[in-house]
Amino acid sequence: MTKMLDEDLRLVEQSIYLPLVLSVLEYDRKVTGLTAFKIKLVYLHLIEHTMLKVQKDLKKINDEMRKLKVKVIRGTNDGVFTEYDIYYKGYHEAHRFFNANLKNNTEKLLTYYLNKDTQ
């Protein structure tokens, strides 16, 4: 991403990772709803509260990207790499992300959001 500023690069990365965090939380919400917990509502509330925080931040990022004329589209996934098409101020760049890195960074971001109110 040689043509992108560091600040814009952070926006692109967040626009990739935050939807992944939301999909993990959505899966966890479904599994929690089906699993036998003694006090299930506490866990569901935590997941839903975290989802709201992530959605709020994702909306801000999408608004900022729209202003900067940046668009990110998820492409193919071959099991090892996931390709993303990035459109930046009239330029197109295709980037491949290692799936293990996507998972690790998503996990870090999820940990951040789950601990956000306790810090």
Image: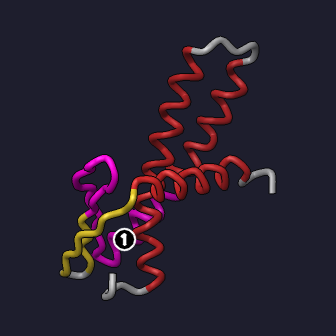
**Image location of residue 71, percent across then percent down:** 28, 67
Colouring method of the image: secondary structure
**Residue designated by label 1:** 65
**Image location of residue 47, percent across then percent down:** 61, 35
Left/right placement of residue 77 relative to residue 57 reads left
Instruction: Reply yes or no: does residue 111 show up in magenta.
Output: no
Q: Nearer the viewer, residue 80 or 22?
A: 80
Q: Residue furthest right?
A: 119
Mark 1 element type: helix
Q: Nearer the viewer, residue 66 or 20?
A: 20
Give the image quarter of residue 73: bottom left
| Residue drawn where x is 22% and y is 52% of the image | 76
Left/right placement of residue 118 relative to residue 65 reads right
Q: Which residues are magenta?
A: 56-84
Left/right placement of residue 18 relative to residue 83 reads right
Instruction: Reply yes or no: does residue 57 show up in magenta.
Output: yes
**Image location of residue 67, percent across then percent down:** 34, 75
Tell me the kind of residue under disc 1: Met
Position of residue 30 relative to residue 94, above or below, is above
**Image location of residue 28, percent across then percent down:** 55, 31
Badge 1 density bin: few <14, some 14–19, many ≥20, Cα 10 Å:
some
